[in-house]
Amino acid sequence: MTTMINWLEKRADLSPNTDAVKLSDGTTYSFSELYHHARSMALQLKQEGIKSGDHVSVISPNHYRFLVTIHALNLIGAVSFLMNIRLSSAEIAFQLQDGDVSAVILDQRYENLVGDDLNVIDIHSGNLDQPLEQKSHSMDLDDLSHVIYTSGTTGQPKGVELTYGNHWWNANGSALNLGLYAHDRWLLSLPMFHVGGLSIVYRSVIYGIPLHLHESFDVEAIHDDIMNQGVTIMSVVSVMLDQLLERLGNDYYPEQFRCMLLGGGPAPKPLLTRARDKHVPVYQTYGMTETASQFCTLDDQNAFDKLGAAGKPLFPNQLDIVQDDESLPAQQVGEIVVHGPSVTKGYYKRPDETADKLQNGWLKTGDLGYFDKDGFLYVVDRRKDLIISGGENVYPAEIESVLKGHPHIADAGVVGQKNERWGEVPVAFIVEREPVDEQELTTYCQNHLANYKVPKTWYKTDELPRNAAKKLLRHQLQARLEE
Amino acid sequence: MTTMINWLEKRADLSPNTDAVKLSDGTTYSFSELYHHARSMALQLKQEGIKSGDHVSVISPNHYRFLVTIHALNLIGAVSFLMNIRLSSAEIAFQLQDGDVSAVILDQRYENLVGDDLNVIDIHSGNLDQPLEQKSHSMDLDDLSHVIYTSGTTGQPKGVELTYGNHWWNANGSALNLGLYAHDRWLLSLPMFHVGGLSIVYRSVIYGIPLHLHESFDVEAIHDDIMNQGVTIMSVVSVMLDQLLERLGNDYYPEQFRCMLLGGGPAPKPLLTRARDKHVPVYQTYGMTETASQFCTLDDQNAFDKLGAAGKPLFPNQLDIVQDDESLPAQQVGEIVVHGPSVTKGYYKRPDETADKLQNGWLKTGDLGYFDKDGFLYVVDRRKDLIISGGENVYPAEIESVLKGHPHIADAGVVGQKNERWGEVPVAFIVEREPVDEQELTTYCQNHLANYKVPKTWYKTDELPRNAAKKLLRHQLQARLEE
């Protein structure tokens, strides 16, 4: 067990007057202010009954209060369940129950997503400037900080357990790869309820650098921030990069902008080429919730030479390409397995799935890839059947399971269809029991699923391709789509 | 337990062609070459019978082979006991026996220091370019990497246990304080058998930056290295800084030279002022073997403003000023106690001293200091009675114990005397049993002690000041000296 002082408290001591955060309206808060606000919020939450070890859900879009809440729950020692605001109330209800959550801190716009049997706290209530006594807070690297749900091939979402240690190693591995400069400023526009955004929260505090917090992906505001406000690093997914390049037009980013960290699924080569032509330093990454965000990243020496590669595993991570438990040589495609201190210790209350995916400390990702002759990773296919739409992971099995719950649907199969804006969108093949119109199906899905999971096109068919064991053959559906 | 890939192996994969080391004759070796050499050396050492868990002593001045040997022993999983080459054979014999050392790897110049009952291996033997099969090496942060002996107030040297974790946190805490730049190059001239030099060995591999390895403190060679070879950081003790400033004369260091890390005891204020006048960015540090080197360091924002301060504890270290187990307010002098993941877990085979000095994870340093109103540490006095001579720690009790072993000496007391070049030198007060001349005493001490511990002046007296419990009152000797 490695116990240590709470990181925000430590940072507030080391860099009290450094900007911790800059909001898009120009407001800034120093690390000393952020720490005071987090302690004020922690005091309020304790008064609401939240204590160390509690499971607490947070449902909010990016906002300074969301950042403060994450730190406040860390100070209390509660485990925070960060939830995607785009989920349906049915999906939220599942996570609250599965996660044994006792309180929910939310933006009131999302109040209708939550039942009234829980302790519900408005994230915007309470005074952040309370008078406080001096006190020290500790944390342990082995303690759980967050549980974040991901879906899987079985359709049942499961909670990925992340410890403080996972975040620590992730933040340090990234600094050892990208370097750490006195004037660094990291633009945060990815949602903090996803691990990609959350990891920036920890990096800011560990590195002692400001994060530029955007409440949404407003191309104009972000473009201005990069051009005029000293941003040096930004994390994006492909759809964001595409729009930023379009906005950039014939202009160029200032020299201090040194890294566009691109995650959230394989990037189309033409996009990477466009970025290179504009001298935008894109560093492709590979990572997932289970690795507390980026696990492999290109470095500055190879950002332009190894177009399409996701780099090498960050210090001291390890990655291997295997088939039938044997390592494969360079150029051969196999399953990606990962090992290292930023990898999750397991799934909440899922001993079987944990044992199945994590063996001898190596996590089977289900993704396919290969090493080139220099040991750089190329990801050729994401987790079996996974659809990535605008950086959000969409699992067909989860949608199919909802569709098959509709009384007029006898069978359903979902696959991803290429989409210029979102990369992919889900589309559904259905076998009707009784006639049903598309509008009704869409509304039905919207009641059960986040909007990005709702099929965008409906194909009616007499029968779905299944093998002898009745397993759906999604690649045949995919082939039909391409015809 | 946090197991991970061996750091040098990892670095050789990430940065195979980056310079790992540059020797003063201009020779460079890449991380890939250093890794191959370390593996070749490990193979040879295994053939000599060294295996995982063995205690192996290394006795060598700075040399590329010393660096290779440190990594080779890590690859094997042996614990290396790094010994000061300036110790006498009696001191070495004590450490070898106390440390249960089974093999000694040495530079042949030091062969006479070691008895012939051990497995002695010439550090310069063996081919570093052996053909090798691919193999992966792991390490665990909780495993011992080194034991380094320090003396103490009782006079009996004791082995400080350092784990890989201690080095990891030290290296990362330093990077989070100083930043990490793509063009960084760290000049290593401090001996690698001291923790100050050893820590640079680990930083080089963890950061992926070259170390410029000097076999001795050759002012001309080091001056040239800083002026013309792109060095950005150097670790020094006061006596080195003094000579470098003198050599610098009316010139200035190039802009990329960004940090002169000054450790090894309190620095004289006039020296700090001279450095500031020459725009030399001196970052004063506070640390010791027990903290795997620097524990507190000034940062770039305060390097010039807080002259004389040793900064704040590196991320995520904690430091407190206490008296009778109570924290003291700012400006009040008390004992310095430290806590954090770079602090040793204890002294080898010394459960009582470990329990006495390490309580609830806080190490009592014995040093005195205070915080200013902004929380910056000022060290006012090093460990009780400690003499620091040219960066080497000298404990009076150890010298007194040797002196009292001489048949003609009835009693002896040692204190430090100010010295312009070395900071302090030890001087002895002796009560004779029978007349003895100074030359004989000096020779006698040289046979038992490292030269820097041999008293430089002898004062004969009829009686030493002792209290009722017969405890030597060294401060009265000190007062006599000042008269």
Image: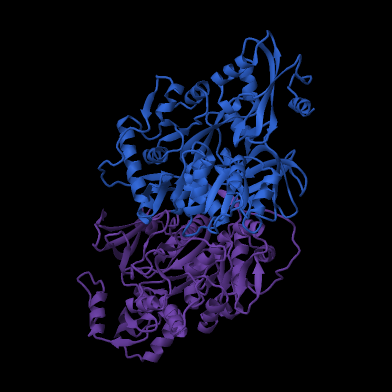
Chain colours: A purple, B blue
The residue depicted at 43 percent of the width and 20 percent of the height is: B115
Residue B360, placed above or below residue B84 = below
Q: Quadrant of residue A49?
A: bottom right
Residue A35: image location, x then y, percent: 66, 63
In this picture, residue A88 sits left or right of residue A267: right
Q: Nearer the viewer, residue B100 or B480?
A: B480
Residue B150: image location, x then y, percent: 57, 32
Residue B389, placed above or below residue B117 = below
Residue B465: image location, x then y, percent: 77, 20
On the rendered image, what quadrant is the C terminus of chain B found in? top right
Q: How many marks?
A: 0
- Residue with the most extreme front position: B250
In this picture, residue B241 sits left or right of residue A362: right
The residue depicted at 60 percent of the width and 14 percent of the height is: B440
Residue B457 seen in render: yes
Q: Nearer the viewer, residue B291 or B122?
A: B122
The residue depicted at 32 percent of the width and 45 percent of the height is: B36
Residue B168 seen in render: no
Residue A418: image location, x then y, percent: 32, 82
- Residue with the most extreme top position: B434
Residue B156, placed above or below residue A451 = above
In this picture, residue A204 sits left or right of residue A464: right
Q: Quadrant of residue A483?
A: bottom left
Q: Nearer the viewer, residue A99 or B442?
A: B442
